[in-house]
Amino acid sequence: MPSNENTNGTQAASLQQQIKSRQRVADHGEVFTNPREVNAMLDLVRDESFRLDSRFLEPACGDGNFLIEILRRKLSLVKDIKSPTEWEFKSLIAVGSCYGIELLEDNAEACRERLYGEVVGRMGRMGDLGDYGKSLRYMLQKNIVCGDALTYRTADGKPITFCEWTPIAGSMQFSRRDFQFDFLVNQTHQYSLFDEQGEAQSFDEPVRTYPPLHYTQLYRYEE
Ligand SMILES: C[S@@+](CC[C@H](N)C(=O)[O-])C[C@H]1O[C@@H](n2cnc3c(N)ncnc32)[C@H](O)[C@@H]1O
């Protein structure tokens, strides 16, 4: 029947976009989620997904189907900003709050490139983005980790750490603190304090704290 053929054809095309090869599905469970499902899930946390600095971690991120939609939502909040400097700073707040872990390096790199392309595509600028571009790439390199979310280790066997990027309004700087992923998951290395209401609060210990840097200089953390 023609209508079933169409439906079957559409389903087959959609499935084709969701897998790269049968082998990769068998080896790594690599089946990508389509944008309609991603957005339906993000709508369950709609307010958070439309907040510039809300932090999201996708622990098996593939090439970034969830992270790209989260980034699009965040960047929609800065579309009317006229000042290029303010736009760049805010775009890094958005990028710096998106985190991913992916087992396969080709997927991790594709994810970084997609997120980079999404930001650059909205700038309406071509070519070399100078120090801003270097900082953007550096953030993505740090935030999208090639590693195993189950063993908490990178591809080269080191403990996965994530950077907490905190924007400092007024100075256009970010402060950086690094946290070890397994400590965060297992809630070890925490200390407790009391908040203003006298309620007990737990805080994670960073493994390293850095001095703040201007948003265009973040890549210098590597030097
Ligand atoms: C089902 S796909 C989902 C990809 C993406 N989250 C999406 O919804 O489109 C699962 C992905 O997780 C990766 N993966 C499998 N085991 C993993 C692990 N232990 N740690 C990190 N990533 C893993 C695979 O390589 C694959 O890219």
Image (cartoon, grey):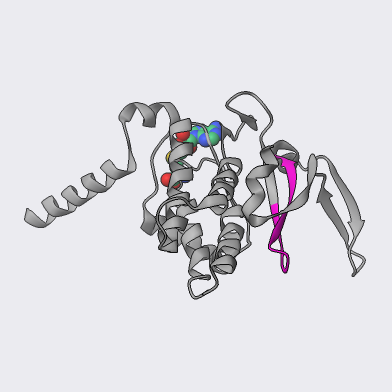
- Estimate the x, y position of residue 108 in percent, counting from the top left: 48, 38
For residue 186, what is the image quadrant? top right
- Determine the residue positioned at 47% across, 57% down: 119
The answer to whether residue 177 is magenta is yes
Of 126 and 21, the residue lying toward us: 126
For residue 188, what is the image quadrant? top right
- Determine the residue positioned at 51% across, 32% down: 103
Of 175 and 134, the residue lying toward us: 134
Q: In this view, does 192 lie above or below 149?
A: below
Kindly tell me whether residue 51 is visible in this rendering: no
Residue 193 as seen in the image, left or right of residue 98: right
Image quadrant occupied by the C terminus: top right
Q: Is residue 80 above or below residue 164?
A: below
Q: Is residue 168 above or below residue 6?
A: below
- Determine the residue positioned at 26% across, 41% down: 16
The number of numbered discs placed on residues in the rendered structure image is 0
Residue sticking out furthest to the left: 1
Of 60 and 174, the residue lying toward us: 174
Residue sticking out furthest to the top: 157
The answer to whether residue 121 is magenta is no
Over which residues does the magenta segment extend?
165-180
**Principal SS element in the magenta part?**
strand
- Estimate the x, y position of residue 77 in percent, counting from the top left: 52, 71
- Estimate the x, y position of residue 174 in percent, counting from the top left: 70, 56
Residue 66 as seen in the image, left or right of residue 20: right
Kindly tell me whether residue 30 is visible in this rendering: yes
- Estimate the x, y position of residue 55 in percent, counting from the top left: 63, 56
- Determine the residue positioned at 50% across, 58% down: 71
